[in-house]
Image (cartoon, rainbow, N blue to C red):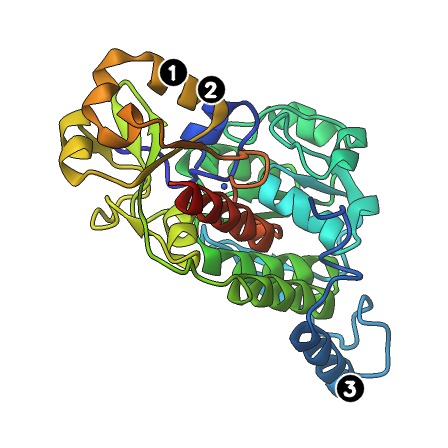
């Protein structure tokens, strides 16, 4: 069974976390907590930039970005009314201090808390185009899934520019931020945020002793996290070993018997998934489950490859470090 590559992009309830597999203050990535490296990058960028306001076009040639559907966005003027149908982008709008331009978001958006004041236009996959058009956007940002192609076509026919980006892996965030910066007319801020996120990931120290983990994503069928997922990358960032890291799919289907054979040191799961797993007698075939070494992930933090990736890595690292010392 092949799940969507957007795993991690649309967490809300835990089931959404599973099938769309990814506390800083709402503005901390764009304001006060930059690392020295990020600040230096910002200063260098500012020094090399024209004296004009970075949000204002400085030439007669409109900046152009090609999205992950191959569509071209010509940013003749900075977008002022943005609908984000991708929670990674919605959160990034706050980090870029452009949340005042956000006029619509999905029902899956949960962070930062201030997102709730933005009108909810429904789902991010196969969206209600009429609901999106009702808030009069001059840009709609979507997740680049096949399920959204028809919506993109309808929006473009209606004269509304679109930007469709995949946000599945760590490296995808920098690309998405750059494209968003072009659309908003502020590529400097986009670069600063991207550099800050990268620095926060590099700053996460690896575990003192490597441990192996199995990420329990779903039970019927048994779904785990493979090498193709941001969450698989996160395991590597903290210095752990994914027992199914040899599988290239983001969310491969495996068997309970194969989990038992690979014998992970710990099982990672969301709160509800962990409760199901520990109540199911079949899972006692896995030694880590029998020995109560099931670690509960904070799915509100560890869920999407967005601007809080550094916080997600620190959270996972602390969880594994504490469990390893207690073992």
* Residue 136 in view, yes or no: no
Callout 3 secondary element? helix
Callout 2 secondary element? helix
Q: In which quarter of the image is the N terminus?
A: top left
Q: Residue at x 75, y 52 (%)?
A: 79
On the image, numbered disc 1 is attached to which residue? 276
- Please, is residue 172 above or below residue 153 in the view? below
Residue 164 relative to residue 98: left or right? left
Q: Which of marks 3 and 1 is nearer the N terminus?
A: 3
- Asked if labels 1 and 2 touch by Cβ distance under 8 angstroms, the answer is yes
On the image, numbered disc 3 is attached to which residue? 47
- Between marks 2 and 1, how big is the CA–CA gap? 6 Å
Q: In which quarter of the image is residue 31?
A: bottom right
- Please, is residue 53 above or below residue 33 in the view? below
> Residue 9: percent from the left, percent from the top?
51, 39
Looking at the image, is mark 3 or mark 1 nearer the viewer?
Answer: 1
> Residue 318: percent from the left, percent from the top?
52, 48
On the image, numbered disc 2 is attached to which residue? 272
Callout 1 secondary element? helix
Label 1 Cα crowd, 10 Å radius (few <14 / some 14-19 / many 20+): some
- Please, is residue 286 above or below residue 238 in the view? above
Q: Residue at x 43, y 56 (%)?
A: 238
Q: Nearer the viewer, residue 262 or 109?
A: 262
- Between marks 3 and 1, how big is the CA–CA gap? 55 Å
- Asked if labels 1 and 3 touch by Cβ distance under 8 angstroms, the answer is no
* Residue 128 in view, yes or no: yes
Looking at the image, is mark 2 or mark 3 nearer the viewer?
Answer: 2
Label 2 Cα crowd, 10 Å radius (few <14 / some 14-19 / many 20+): few
Q: Which residue is drawn at 58% across and 68% down?
A: 199
> Residue 74: percent from the left, percent from the top?
64, 60
Q: In which quarter of the image is residue 62?
A: bottom right
Q: Nearer the viewer, residue 250 or 262?
A: 262
């Amino acid at each position: 069974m092949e799940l969507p590559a957007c795993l991690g992009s649309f967490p809300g309830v835990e089931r959404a976390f599973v099938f769309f597999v990814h506390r800083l203050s709402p503005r901390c990535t764009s304001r006060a907590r930059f690392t020295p490296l990020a600040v230096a990058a910002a200063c260098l960028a500012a020094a090399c930039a024209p004296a004009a306001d970075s949000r204002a076009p400085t030439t007669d040639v409109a900046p152009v970005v090609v999205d992950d559907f191959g569509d071209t966005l010509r940013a003749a003027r900075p977008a002022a009314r943005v609908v984000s149908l991708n929670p990674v982008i919605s959160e990034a709008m706050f980090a870029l201090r452009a949340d005042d331009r956000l006029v619509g978001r999905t029902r899956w958006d949960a962070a930062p808390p201030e997102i709730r004041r933005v009108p909810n236009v429904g789902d991010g996959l196969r969206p209600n185009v009429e609901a999106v058009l009702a808030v009069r956007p001059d840009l709609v940002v979507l997740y680049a899934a096949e399920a959204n192609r028809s919506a993109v076509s309808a929006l473009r026919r209606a004269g509304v520019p679109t930007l469709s980006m995949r946000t599945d892996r760590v490296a995808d965030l920098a690309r998405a931020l750059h494209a968003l910066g072009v659309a908003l007319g502020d590529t400097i801020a986009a670069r600063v945020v991207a550099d800050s996120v990268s620095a926060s990931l590099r700053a996460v120290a690896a575990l003192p002793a490597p441990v192996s983990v199995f990420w329990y994503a779903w039970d019927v069928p048994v779904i785990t996290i493979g090498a193709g997922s941001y969450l698989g990358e996160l395991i590597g960032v903290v210095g752990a070993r994914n027992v199914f890291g040899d599988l290239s799919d983001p969310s491969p289907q495996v068997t309970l018997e194969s989990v038992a054979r690979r014998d992970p040191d710990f099982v990672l799961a969301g709160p509800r998934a962990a409760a199901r797993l520990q109540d199911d007698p079949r899972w006692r075939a896995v030694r880590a489950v029998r020995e109560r070494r099931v670690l509960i992930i904070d799915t509100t933090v560890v869920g999407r490859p967005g601007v809080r990736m550094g916080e997600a890595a620190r959270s996972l690292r602390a969880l594994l470090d504490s469990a390893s010392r207690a073992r």
